[in-house]
Image (tube, rainbow, N blue to C red):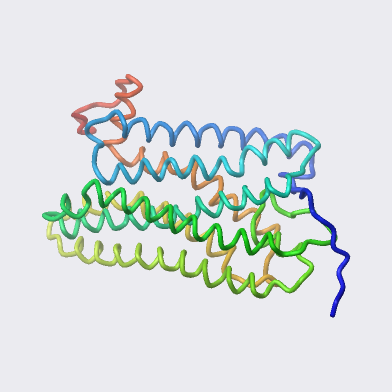
Amino acid sequence: MEVYNLTTVKDFILAGLSETPTLNIFLIVIFILIYVITVLGNTAIIIAYKHSPNLQSPMYYLLANFSFLEICYVSDTCPKLLSNSVGNNKSISFYGCVTQMYCGLLFAGTEFYILASMAYDRYSAICRPLLYNMIMNKVSCMQLVAGSWLIGAINAVIHTSLTFTLPFCGSNNINHYYCDIPPLLKLACVDTKVNELTLFLISGLVIIGSFILTMVSYVKIISTILKIKSVTGRKKAFSTCTSHLMAVSVFYGSIFSVYFKPKSKYEIEQDRVVSVLYTVLAPLLNPFIYSIRNNEMKCALQKLLHINICSQKALGCP
């Protein structure tokens, strides 16, 4: 039986943005701008939904919840990343690391099923328009959101509890900019095959399950759109889905590349770059994807800010 020199870990040391001072300053400025724009942009979507009668529909209700999730998600990593990069102290307490991991997994797991709910909303609107108001009523929308949060919470509890019951020995340096499962498994001084298997199976159920639900909705959406004889009608129907498809592609693509591989295949430096896509850039892109390509949201934001730049006739603003 192997004996390990175990010590009680009180904190971890997170890797910064860069070891090069000049590059580090540049990245700090970039990440500050990204964080501010992300929070302001997603907050603007939520406020526009709250104060615009034209946006009181299931699609925008789900979008407002998605925007709230994006604010939470980016706030879980960015502030700590920036504070560690600015100061010399790059540590995070043991329980701070637990909290950061739990929240990150909670928001990510919830986001998968909010995206699936948004796909189902588009399926209902395009494939079953006559029953849309009955299917996507206020109660069903609230149930979809609540169910998404419940799945995210269960997923987060399982992975966080399994990860932080592992004994850590030797270095407490996490080669990542936030507390995530793969780099923490690298620090464990026991066999982590059970954790890896659980990560693969539970994450598979959560991620693949939501992915299948999303793809099933889109297969039916596309088949319905192709049956529309009018070219204009097809373009109009598909335009309501393109923004969501872009968000799904960025989020799922980056998540798959990090979590669905064995511990021996983890390339931390590469994974740190990929992680930026779903923890920082995806929340940043959300306001642009859903507002610039959406005339109703664009007009609502302009009315909210009292900016009369858009031509009401060109954009169809009421």
Q: Is residue 137 above or below residue 49?
A: below
Compare residues 65 and 7 and report the one nearer the observer: 7
Report the residue at 51% width, 33% height from top: 37
Judge from the rendering whether residue 98 lies leftward or rightward of residue 281; answer left or right.
right
Expressed as whole percent of the image width and height from the top left, the position of residue 56 reads 24, 37
Query: On the rendered image, what quadrant is the N terminus found in?
Result: bottom right
Report the residue at 55% width, 55% height from top: 105
- Total number of numbered labels? 0
Judge from the rendering whether residue 59 lies leftward or rightward of residue 4; answer left or right.
left
Report the residue at 64% width, 74% height from top: 194
Compare residues 36 and 30 and report the one nearer the observer: 36
Q: Is residue 221 above or below residue 28?
A: below
Report the residue at 24% width, 46% height from top: 138
Q: Is residue 183 above or below residue 304?
A: below
User: In the picture, residue 80 is in which quadrant?
Assistant: top right
Compare residues 79 and 242 and report the one nearer the observer: 79
Expressed as whole percent of the image width and height from the top left, the position of residue 74 reads 55, 42
Extreme residue in the bottom direction: 1
Expressed as whole percent of the image width and height from the top left, the position of residue 211 reads 41, 64
Query: On the rendered image, what quadrant is the C terminus found in?
Result: top left
Judge from the rendering whether residue 15 lies leftward or rightward of residue 312; answer left or right.
right
Compare residues 56 and 198 and report the one nearer the observer: 198
User: In the picture, residue 196 is in which quadrant?
Assistant: bottom right
Expressed as whole percent of the image width and height from the top left, the position of residue 163 reads 66, 62
